[in-house]
Image (cartoon, rainbow, N blue to C red):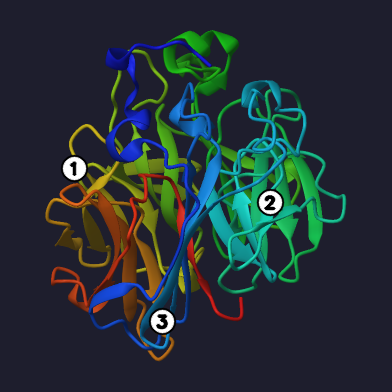
Amino acid sequence: MTEQTAEATPFWLTENFAPVHEEVTATDLKVTGTIPSALSGRLLRNGANPQSGWSDHWFLGNGMLHGVEIRDGKANWYRNRYVKTPFFLKPDADVMESLGDMNMSTANTNVIHHAGKIMALEEGHWPFVVDDQLETVGPNNYAGKLTGPMTAHPKTCAATGEMLAFAYSMMEPYLTYYRISASGELLQVEPITVGAGTMIHDFNITRNNVVFMDLPALWNLEGIADSGLPIVWDESYGARLGVMPRNGSDKDVTWYEINPCYVFHPLNAYEDGNKIILDVCRMEDAMKPGSEAPPMLYRWVIDQDKGTVSETQLDDRVVDFPRVCDTVVGLKNRYGYAAAFAPNLPVAAGLIKYDLDSSSSSYHDLKGGQGSEAVFVKDPAGSSEDDGWVLSYVYRPETNQSDVVIVDSRHFDQEPVATIHLPVRVPAGFHGNWVPDGY
């Protein structure tokens, strides 16, 4: 553990970013308002929560899952559990020295469900399966077919149920594409040729294609001195988007140059004739010493006939953790949701709903609360894309406890229809999802 003074304590170990260490189970949670009866499942969220109390970077702490079960208009329980991987079971291990051992995952970035499994993910190791009570089951290497890491941001196709994913590496192959069937079988492992090992946090899918983002955040051990991660910003590498048919191979990738930038998270992508539309939270750079480039919503349009990419800024507010309704992932979407960041901290002061057809938006003010990723849950009885609710964990500094707010997407700027009060603090974290009953 690195020696630090109190004055040098980094933000990810202070205030609501600081880890919690007790695993709690609380039942019969207090609710203000009325929980929609159609909500039946669990709101899960993952984040870095170093068991030692220290980590050299926000991205490197042990994964801890937080969950609230909702059914029949009631909030049945809240629980938090460490993801008990071999890395957790060896408290003195160094995650940066464990990148070759696919079991040694922090499992701290995302939590998803696919093919009957709930999985906690990070991007340097295998996914780890947990049960619906958040207890760790073990790694998923897809019957031995997954020999390397897998991204924390796979995409489940709304039309086919396939899960599409990738991995990046410091050694060749620097990029590998995965295609997983709706039943959970790893069907395709495809190395993709890129110029160097780069940090590729996320990617894009459409109905017929995947789109890789090959951007100039390069693996280099010299970066540890500046950011705590072995990554450096090098614009001389260039930046480009690679379009490949979803069942294609390396030879089928078409690359399109773009202006140097970085994207941690896209909102969605879809096809419009022979054009591909991508809405992303774009940053001017990442891991660049002295730079604090904020993410803002941009649109890229890839014209496959002309071989060009146009770039348009859609909003000048600082936003990230973008989401769409799961039924339109990779398809044309009208609406999107994002966290509107508070000044100088990666927490949400409010939530934004975008109407991308009318170029308008609505704002949900968290009124002093600190929110997290806005997860959209579709109303099963709804007919339009935005018939549903947006859920988010929200920290309340005045009580040092957290809530789950449930906002009606159709009345987004109004008060939540329900607030579930938790007896504990849920630290600021990364990504989560709604896992419906019968997943």
**In which quadrant of the rendered view does residue 364 lie?**
bottom left
Q: Earlier in the sequence, mark 2 or mark 1?
A: 2
Q: Is residue 373 left or right of residue 201?
A: left
Image location (x, y in percent) of residue 193 = 71, 32
User: Can residue 266 be seen here?
Assistant: yes
Image location (x, y in percent) of residue 47 = 47, 45
Instruction: Report the Cα–Cα distance between label 3 and label 1.
Output: 34 Å
Q: Is disc 3 surrounded by few (<14), some (14 to 19) or many (20+) residues within 10 Å?
A: many
Q: Residue at x 37, y 45 (%)?
A: 427
Q: Is disc 1 surrounded by few (<14), some (14 to 19) or many (20+) residues within 10 Å?
A: few
| Location of mark 1 (residue) | 316
Numbered badge on residue 39: 3
Numbered badge on residue 241: none
Amino acid tagged 2: Phe
Vertical arrangement, residue 33 with respect to residue 278, above or below:
below
Vertical arrangement, residue 247 with respect to residue 328, above or below:
above
| Location of mark 2 (residue) | 128
Image location (x, y in percent) of residue 167 = 67, 40
Amino acid tagged 3: Leu
Frontmost residue, 210 versus 115: 115
Q: Earlier in the sequence, mark 3 or mark 1?
A: 3
Q: Residue at x 18, y 42 (%)?
A: 316
